[in-house]
Image (cartoon, rainbow, N blue to C red):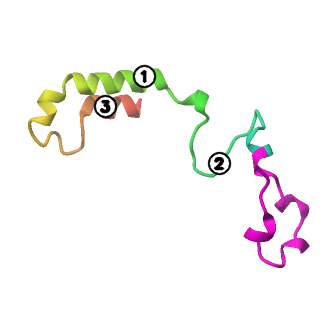
Amino acid sequence: MPIAWERVLAKRAPFLHSYVKVDLDAVWETPDLIFFGDGAPSKQQVPVQRLRQAHADAWEEASEILSSYGEPHGYLPLREAIAE
C-alpha cells in the first residue's frame, strides 16, 4: 500500500528532495536491507532455538521459582543464556 504523503508530510514537502518520498513497502521487500531504526537484528540472527531451550529450562524449574519472589536480578540461567 503506497503512503499518502500529502496526508503525513508538511505542505512544504513537495519542495523536498525526492529521496524523502519513498514507497516504504518496496523498501521493506529489499532482501539485503539492514534496518537500524529500532536496533533489532535481522530475523535470521535471532537464536530462536536457544531462546526456546532457555524458556523450557526456566519453566522446568518454575515450581522453585514461583514459590517465592526468586532472585532479585532474575533467574540466573536465563540471564546467562540471554547474555551469551
Q: Position of residue 41 (x, y in %)?
A: 58, 38
Looking at numbered disc 2 in the image, what kind of residue is underneath it? Phe
The residue lying furthest to the front in this view is: 1
Q: Secondary structure at mark 3?
A: helix
Q: Secondary structure at mark 1?
A: helix
User: Tag count in the figure?
Assistant: 3
15 relative to 39, above or below: below
Q: Which residue is mark 1?
A: 50
| Residue at 31% over, 22% down | 56
The span from disc 2 to disc 3 (Cα, nearest Å) is 27 Å
Q: Earlier in the sequence, mark 1 or mark 3?
A: 1
Segment colored magenta: 1-25
Look at the image and tell me in which quarter the C terminus lies.
top left
Q: Position of residue 25 (x, y in %)?
A: 76, 46
5 relative to 68, above or below: below
The residue lying furthest to the left in this view is: 67
Find out whether the residues at labels 1 and 3 contact each other: C-beta distance under 8 Å.
no
Q: Earlier in the sequence, mark 2 or mark 1?
A: 2
Q: Find residue 58 and report its image quarter.
A: top left
| Residue at 84% over, 78% down | 12
Looking at numbered disc 3 in the image, what kind of residue is underneath it? Leu
Looking at the image, residue 36 sits to the left or right of residue 13; the answer is left
Find out whether the residues at labels 2 and 3 contact each other: C-beta distance under 8 Å.
no
Q: Position of residue 21 (x, y in %)?
A: 84, 60
Q: Which mark is residue 36?
A: 2
Q: Nearer the viewer, residue 11 or 83?
A: 11
| Residue at 70% over, 41% down | 34
Q: Which residue is mark 3?
A: 78
